[in-house]
Image (tube, rainbow, N blue to C red):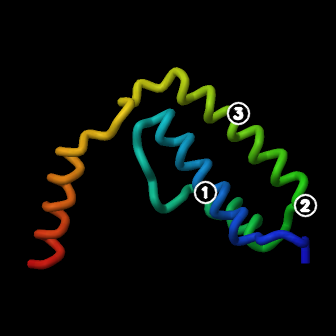
Amino acid sequence: GKNYDSKNLMHTFRLLDMAEEIARERTLTVRRPNIDFLMTIRRGEFEYDDLIEMAEEKIEKIAGLYQTADLPEKPDRNQANTTLVEIRHKAYQ
């Protein structure tokens, strides 16, 4: 009833949180610790303009974090392929 796609915006904030976590901690937590907040978005408990403002602020913050993050410019393709093969071997055994 808020005239926006609450599921889409919930996932937007989830992904923004994950991007921030990667820049800050070089980790990725799939099960989000702020699930209660995300579900309030999903239930449509925010006004659209408020969510957009919060998202824009978060995007600016994340951009600053990535400017100083010590992440590599490109992924290690060999390591990614090795990990993928290991996962597939375990899944098919």
Among the 4 quarters of the image, the one containing residue 37: bottom right
Disc tally is 3
Circle 3 — which element?
Answer: helix
Residue at mark 3? 60
- Judged from this view, the residue extending furthest toward the top is 68
Q: How far apart are marks 2 and 1 (CA)?
A: 18 Å
Residue at image position (66%, 55%) is 13
Q: Position of residue 68 (x, y in %)?
A: 52, 21
> Badge 1: few (under 14), some or many (20 or more) residues near its Cα, within 10 Å?
some
Three-letter code for the amino acid on which mark 3 is drawn: Glu
Pointer 3 local density, CA inside 10 Å: few below 14, some 14–19, many at least 20: few
Closest to the camera, between mark 3 and mark 1, is 3
User: Residue at point 84% right, 45% down?
Assistant: 53
Q: Position of residue 4 (x, y in %)?
A: 84, 69
| Within-10-Å neighbours for mark 2: few <14, some 14–19, many 20+ | few
In the depicted structure, whether residue 24 falls above or below residue 88:
above
Q: What residue type is labelled 2?
A: Glu
User: Depth check: 71 or 37 in front?
Assistant: 71
Mark 1, residue position: 14
Which sits earlier in the primary sequence, circle 3 or circle 1? 1
